[in-house]
């Protein structure tokens, strides 16, 4: 039963990592690419680390796996948000098909020093 759970976790984690890679390759602008890479790869890496923790089942593996997963869940969304905000502020071109820009009026201008 444990082997089946580990296999399901590994396959689903690998699938999410592949989806993240496809999103980075196929999506049209930097904001969408960061969204794909942050959401899917964080979930994929978390599932793979959980599979390792379940497979080995010893504290020397479980503790770093859970700590790494928690670190990913805490840092990846924050860093992606800050990178996307700075990319928008510096004028990185957005997708031409974007029809709603909610940040246009609320974002302060970048001042060069």
Image (cartoon, helix red, strand yellow):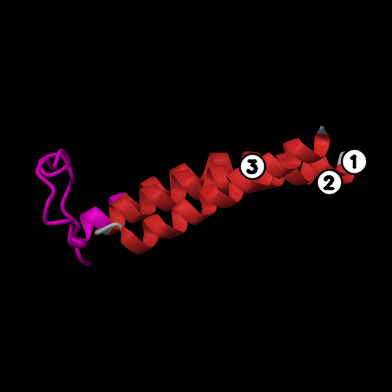
The quadrant in which residue 90 appears is bottom left
Alpha carbon separation for disc pair 1 and 2: 6 Å
Image disc number at residue 66 = none
- Mark 3, residues whose alpha carbon is within 10 Å: few (<14), some, or many (≥20)? many
Look at discs 3 and 1 and give the one toward the viewer: 3
Comes first in the chain, label 3 or label 2: 3
Q: Is residue 30 left or right of residue 42?
A: left
Q: Are marks 1 and 2 in contact (CB under 8 Å)?
A: yes
Residue 54 placement (x, y as % from top left): 80, 38
Specify whether residue 100 is painted magenta. Answer: yes
* Mark 3 vs 1, N-terminal side: 3
| Position in image of residue 77 (x %, y %) | 45, 43
Extent of the magenta region: 85-113
Q: How many marks?
A: 3
Q: Of residues 73 and 89, which is closer to you in this image?
A: 73
Give yes or no for residue 77 being in the magenta stretch: no
**What residue is shown at x 17% (from left), y 47% (from top)?**
108
Taking the image as drawn, is residue 68 in sight? no
Residue at image location 80% in from the left, 40% down from the top: 3
Structural distance between the alpha carbons of marks 3 and 1: 17 Å
Tell me the SS state at disc 1.
loop
Q: Which residue is mark 1?
A: 58
Residue 61's disc number: 2
Residue 29 appears anywhere in the view: yes
Q: Quadrant of the C terminus?
A: bottom left
Which residue is the site of mark 3? 47
């Amino acid at each position: 039963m444990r082997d089946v759970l580990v296999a399901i976790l590994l396959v689903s984690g690998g699938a999410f990592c592949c989806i993240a890679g496809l999103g980075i390759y196929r999506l049209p602008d930097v904001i969408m690419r960061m969204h794909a890479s942050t959401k899917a790869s964080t979930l994929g890496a978390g599932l793979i680390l959980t599979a390792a923790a379940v497979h080995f089942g010893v504290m020397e593996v479980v503790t770093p796996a859970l700590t790494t997963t928690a670190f990913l869940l805490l840092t990846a969304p924050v860093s992606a948000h800050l990178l996307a905000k700075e990319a928008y502020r510096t004028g990185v071109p957005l997708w031409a098909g974007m029809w709603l820009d909610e940040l246009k009026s609320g974002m302060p201008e970048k001042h060069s020093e």
